[in-house]
Image: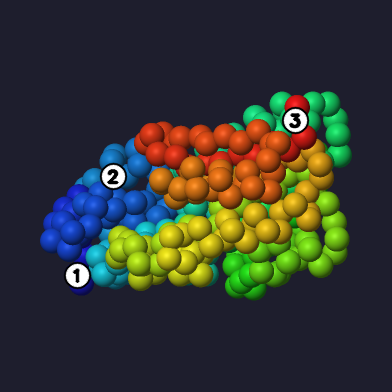
Amino acid sequence: MVTKKVFEALKWASSYLKKHNRDENAGEWLLLWILNMDRSKLLAEQRMSLTEDQWHHFEQVVKQHALGKPIQYIIGYEEFYGRRFMVNEHVLIPRPETEELIEAVLHRINHLFPGNQHLKLADIGTGSGAIAITIKLERPDLEVMATDISQDALKVANSNAQVLGADVTFRQGDLLMPILQTGEKWDIILSNPPYIPAHDVLDKIVQDHEPSLALFAGEDGLDFYRRFALELPKVVHEKSLIAFEIGAGQGEAVVALMKEVFPTALTEILFDINGKDRIVLIQCGSE
């Protein structure tokens, strides 16, 4: 019977991953998942022997990650805003920067819409549902709807909403089309759209495994913001809040696009924890 103790398994994984230019600590994350342990228990059980099945499973997933498969797609989830979201190859893995978008939006909602108003919020291109579901759970009083062009992504988002107990409505369609078709007006529109220029070279793990439909946006990465500029005036109230996540260096270009269609709105560029422009906020009718 071929098996190993915990410390031996971790030592092997660290060496194997380093040899394949991966994070040496990823093995610990994978072993925590296989053993269903927290880190403190794993550290206390360093001399525990793995079963043969556990060792073979660990060996298999470490090799998968070494070949480039993201850990989140192996274990099936990512932590976001203190909650666990299911992810697979049909949705982007939620990033910490997007938590900053949610923080900014929650703050601006309180400022722009004081009191107990009935507000409608739409998350466009929802993917895993992380933005829409988090907003709904943080502000249950909001009516929240989310769209995505991918039916497979919407299945993931809908599952996450059910597991996390978030009352979010999902609609399938390209960008704002599900709203344009109904003639509705919304108070708040959020989106973390594709914004990577077509010829950018990404980390191979991202490029080979995350859905390109949710990553790339034309030669300069601004194609979706151009479409938003054309369509947003048709779907928002005179007093409204619009918020985008953007790629680093795109802030001024996105603001310029929005100022063409919302010339009197208050527009802001917010920078992320790494000092990169990451969020554009447009407050219409706030004067």
Residue 80 at what x, y percent from top left? Answer: 52, 46
Q: Which residue is mark 1?
A: 2
Rounded to the nearest angstrom, the CA distance separating label 1 from label 2 is 19 Å
- Vertical side of 285 occupied by 32: above or below: below
Q: Which residue is pictured at 46% across the width and 59% down the height?
A: 221
Location of residue 183 (image quadrant): bottom right
Q: Secondary structure at mark 2?
A: loop
For badge 2, the amino acid type reads: Glu
User: Quick check: 181 left or right of 105?
Assistant: right
Neighbour tally class for label 1: few under 14, some 14-19, many 20 plus, Cα within 10 Å? few
Location of residue 63 (image quadrant): bottom left
Foreground label between 1 and 3: 3
- Residue 201, disc: none
Residue 106 at what x, y percent from top left? Answer: 66, 34
Give the mark nearer the N terminus: 2 vs 3: 2
Rounded to the nearest angstrom, the CA distance separating label 1 from label 3 is 67 Å
Q: Secondary structure at mark 1?
A: loop
Total numbered circles:
3
For the residue pair 93 and 117, the one nearer the viewer reads as 117
For badge 3, the amino acid type reads: Ser
User: Quick check: 9 left or right of 186?
Assistant: left
Is residue 1 something one can see in this rendering?
yes
Rounded to the nearest angstrom, the CA distance separating label 2 from label 3 is 57 Å
- Vertical side of 162 occupied by 280: above or below: above
User: Quick check: 169 left or right of 126?
Assistant: right
Image quadrant where one finds the N terminus:
bottom left
Q: Which residue is pictured at 85% across the width and 56% down the height?
A: 184
Image quadrant where one finds the C terminus:
top right
Is mark 2 in CB contact (under 8 Å) with mark 3? no
